[in-house]
Image: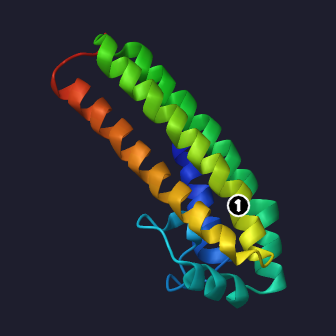
Amino acid sequence: MVTFVLLLAVNWVAFFDLQGGSFARKLLDLRVMGYTVPEAEMFARGLSFEEKTAYREVYLILDFVFIGFLCALLYALSQAITSCRIRRGLLVATVVFAAMDLSENTLVPQIIDGDFELAKWASLATQLKFAALGIAAALVVMSWRKGRFE
């Protein structure tokens, strides 16, 4: 439940506080298919000083907390799975998700500050984050469908 509330809070800040209610300028962190250096540069140059401050002081803090809660939830789910292979797979996907999201959260503020060449690495981290999360979700659903929960 806490994870869901944090997810709502992160998205509220992302869509309304940072973007003035506009869904047109999607945050780099939420672009599942990644982004290019010119797209990252255009995004960063389009942010006002207040939006950059809100990103650093509100969105990133909520995102770091959300990462912790989501990983705790995935870990708890992994402990309920009876199949050792699926449990290990879920744990690996969780670690990859956390590592990539934390990497992304350290790179995006630097991109916002003007180091646009880091966008290649941040984009890769974003894509790997979503891939790991998709794999984790698929493993949980597969375990649930096959009745492999204790």
Q: Position of residue 72 (x, y in %)?
A: 56, 28
Q: Is residue 118 above or below residue 90?
A: below
Q: Is residue 20 visible?
A: no
Q: Position of residue 133 (x, y in %)?
A: 42, 44
Q: Is residue 126 left or right of residue 66?
A: left
- Residue underneath mark 1: 107
Residue visible at 75% across and 52% down in the picture = 61
Q: Which of the 4 image quadrants contains residue 65?
A: top right
Name the quadrant of the C terminus: top left
For label 1, the crowd category at 10 Å Cα-Cα, with few meaning under 14, some 14 to 19 and many 20 or more, is: many
Q: Is residue 113 left or right of residue 104?
A: right
Q: Is residue 85 left or right of residue 123?
A: left
Secondary structure of the residue carrying numbered label 1: helix
Q: Is residue 96 above or below residue 47?
A: above
Q: Amino acid at mark 1?
A: Leu
Residue visible at 69% across and 82% down in the picture = 44
Residue visible at 56% across and 83% down in the picture = 39
Q: Position of residue 101 (x, y in %)?
A: 59, 49
- In-front residue for pair 88/48: 88
- In-front residue for pair 43/61: 43
